[in-house]
């Protein structure tokens, strides 16, 4: 199909309609965000007038863009846009950690990632857990008995370690 003025005018772009505050004259504003919210814009006292004004703006702007041979974005097919499939590359250490978390929970890596995305990554809970681990590690370090003989490994009093783990 020839991509001429009629072609672009026939495409079904998403249109944003918003009321204009009374203090600014009232009415409605229409725009096509994909093509430039402040470039493809129309207004009117009614929604119908604002849409008609937008159609005039579309024709004028499409003619200008075609004359200048500037690429015009086309609306995406909504069926293809959200297939539910995402390809994501992550560092190996993160892949390993996520796969282990999934296995520990008895679920697939895909389900685990979907769950993390759906919950918005509980950042505050992770921060709290990391702080608790840091506090535990810090307190455990102070329980070590350092020996004069550098060849003998330091020991940790099991009772103190267990009591910190239980806290």
Image (spheres, rainbow, N blue to C red):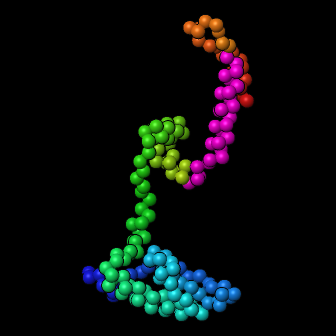
Q: Quadrant of the N terminus?
A: bottom left
- Is residue 134 rendered magenta in the image? yes
Tell me what residue is drawn at x 44 percent, y 59 percent.
84
* Quadrant of the image occupied by residue 153: top right
Tell me what residue is drawn at x 51 percent, y 78 percent.
37
Tell me what residue is drawn at x 65 percent, y 9 percent.
147
* Quadrant of the image occupied by residue 66: bottom left
Which residue is farthest left?
A: 1
Provide the residue span drawn in magenta: 118-144
Where does the image place residue 162, in percent across and percent down from the top left? Answer: 69, 22
Q: Quadrant of the C terminus?
A: top right
Question: Can you say whether 66 is above or below 145 in the image?
Answer: below
Where does the image place residue 7, in percent across and percent down from the top left? Answer: 33, 84
Choose between 147 and 47: the one closer to the eye: 147
Q: Please tell me whether the stretch drawn in magenta is mainly helix, strand or loop.
A: helix
Where does the image place residue 68, in percent across and percent down from the top left? Answer: 33, 81
Question: Can you say whether 90 is above or below 24 in the image?
Answer: above
């Amino acid at each position: 199909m020839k991509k001429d003025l009629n072609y672009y005018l026939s495409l079904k772009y998403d249109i944003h309609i918003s009321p204009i505050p009374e203090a600014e004259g009232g009415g409605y504003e229409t725009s096509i965000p994909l093509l430039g919210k402040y470039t493809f814009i129309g207004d009117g006292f009614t929604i119908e007038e604002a849409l008609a004004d937008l159609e005039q703006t579309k024709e004028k702007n499409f003619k200008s863009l075609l004359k200048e041979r500037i690429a015009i974005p086309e609306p995406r097919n909504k069926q293809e846009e959200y297939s539910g499939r995402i390809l994501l590359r992550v560092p190996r250490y993160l892949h390993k950690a996520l796969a282990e978390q999934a296995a520990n929970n008895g679920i697939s890596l895909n389900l685990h990632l979907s769950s993390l995305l759906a919950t918005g990554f509980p950042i505050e809970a992770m921060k709290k857990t990391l702080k608790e681990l840091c506090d535990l590690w810090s307190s455990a370090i102070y329980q070590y008995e350092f020996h004069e003989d550098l060849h003998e490994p330091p020991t940790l009093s099991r009772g103190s370690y267990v009591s910190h783990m239980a806290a």
